Image (tube, helix red, strand yellow):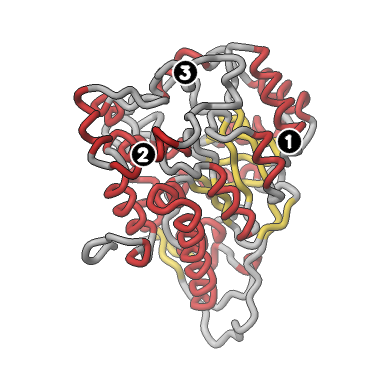
């Protein structure tokens, strides 16, 4: 809930506040790219609303002076059960881009995901930041690019590769169709005024380093030198023949920690376990792909019951509050992951904004655990939940 106007970073006390500040600071095509979903955006809305259908039942008279919020995910122990989902094009939202998010993740000891479509290269991220890092892998038609992405991740000493499996075709992002958003931005008569009305953003974009997608630019011009919408990129550049055999081969070729992102059904979760993945992200791509699909939280319990003893189950999507984190962990998630929860903050104030957002999330998790009467993540169980 936001009360009053949000004009500065000091006015931001929750993720919704960061969203409002981002809206004020970004040209509208860029803001709506971050904020929008597929079709009617019903799934995007449900991703957060799903948490409201379950209530927490706290215990009292528990000594909660000392608290342990750490978890071990994909072989790395992290300070919080929170991961920063990989998201593309971050230097369009703030000139610091992935550098800001990687620095904040490192400071808080969290997993940080780097998209194949990142605007800072894996080589730089690997050289500059020591925290746990994963590559979000998009399976392209260009087999040379596919191999190169793995090699770049290996050379940069990334800790995991996560194959995104829910982008076999681009979702219908109607906000982007209406605003004409592309990467890099295409300045049209309809959008030029919006960019001009945000001079700070415009000067950063025009006068700082040229925008590009360095992981891709040696192989494809799309997104770096040729303007293209993300939905068109998915539909035209990604390989629609990708199947379970391709996923299993990719896991074998990588040889390290490997996850699938975009698993939503019990059947697919079982197949993922069968091919030997280390983790699955229950995710619908932030409600940006198949509208009308279930929310990750709605699917969590049955997937945990089916495969939770075989793979690590990570909930991705809709997380805006510390209570959302605790509800997901109580249902059996190993950790939660989110994109917009830090992207709004990045757009609002760069690294400082991301760090403030993570500080707020950490404070909520700690406070809510104490109010629940829990001193470690392992104490969160389904006994703490009741469906409405």
Q: Earlier in the sequence, mark 3 or mark 1?
A: 1
| Horizontal arrangement in the rendering, residue 164 relative to residue 192 (left or right) | right
* Quarter of the picture holding the N terminus: bottom left
Q: Quadrant of residue 4?
A: bottom left
Visible in this render: residue 147? yes
Residue under pointer 3: 225
Q: CA distance from mark 3 to mark 1?
A: 25 Å
Kindly identify the residue that appears in the image at 72 percent across and 57 percent down: 77
Kindly identify the residue that appears in the image at 58 percent across and 12 percent down: 141
Residue 249 at what x, y percent from top left? 73, 21
| 65 and 34: which is toward the camera | 34
Residue under pointer 1: 156
Q: Quadrant of residue 7?
A: bottom left
Residue under pointer 2: 203
Residue 108 at what x, y percent from top left? 61, 60
Question: Crowding at label 1, few (<14), some or many (≥20) Cα neighbours within 10 Å?
Answer: some
Q: Quadrant of residue 118?
A: top right
């Amino acid at each position: 809930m936001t009360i009053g106007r949000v004009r500065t970073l000091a006015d931001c006390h929750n993720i919704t506040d960061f969203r409002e500040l981002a809206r004020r600071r970004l040209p509208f095509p860029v803001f709506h790219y971050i904020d929008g979903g597929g079709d009617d955006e019903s799934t995007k809305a449900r991703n957060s609303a799903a948490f409201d259908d379950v209530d927490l039942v706290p215990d009292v008279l528990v000594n909660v002076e000392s608290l342990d919020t750490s978890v071990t995910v994909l072989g790395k122990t992290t300070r919080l059960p929170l991961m920063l989902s990989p998201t593309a094009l971050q230097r369009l939202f703030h000139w610091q881009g992935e550098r800001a998010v990687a620095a904040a993740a490192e400071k808080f000891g969290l997993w940080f995901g780097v998209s194949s479509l990142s605007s800072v290269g894996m080589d730089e991220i690997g050289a500059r930041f020591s925290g746990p890092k994963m590559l979000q892998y998009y399976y392209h038609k260009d087999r040379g690019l596919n191999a190169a992405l793995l090699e770049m991740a290996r050379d940069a000493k990334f800790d995991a590769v996560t194959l995104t499996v829910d982008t076999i075709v681009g979702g219908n992002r109607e906000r982007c169709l209406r605003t004409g958003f592309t990467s890099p931005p295409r300045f049209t008569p309809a959008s030029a005024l919006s960019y001009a009305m945000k001079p700070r953003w415009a000067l950063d974009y025009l006068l700082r380093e040229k925008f590009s997608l360095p992981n891709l630019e040696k192989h494809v011009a799309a997104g770096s030198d040729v303007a293209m919408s993300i939905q068109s990129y998915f539909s035209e550049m990604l390989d629609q023949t990708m199947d379970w055999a391709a996923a299993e081969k990719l896991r074998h070729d990588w040889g390290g920690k490997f996850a699938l992102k975009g698993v939503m059904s019990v059947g697919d979760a079982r197949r993922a376990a069968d091919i030997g993945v280390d983790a699955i992200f229950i995710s619908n791509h932030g409600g940006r792909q198949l509208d009308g699909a279930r929310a990750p939280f709605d699917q969590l319990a049955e997937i945990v019951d089916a495969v939770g003893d075989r793979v690590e189950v990570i909930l991705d999507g809709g997380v805006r509050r510390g209570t959302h984190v605790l509800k997901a962990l109580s249902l059996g998630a190993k950790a939660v992951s989110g994109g917009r929860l830090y992207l709004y903050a990045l757009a609002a104030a760069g690294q400082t904004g991301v760090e403030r957002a993570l500080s707020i999330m950490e404070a909520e998790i700690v406070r809510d655990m104490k109010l629940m009467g829990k001193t470690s993540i392992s104490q969160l169980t389904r006994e703490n939940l009741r469906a409405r």
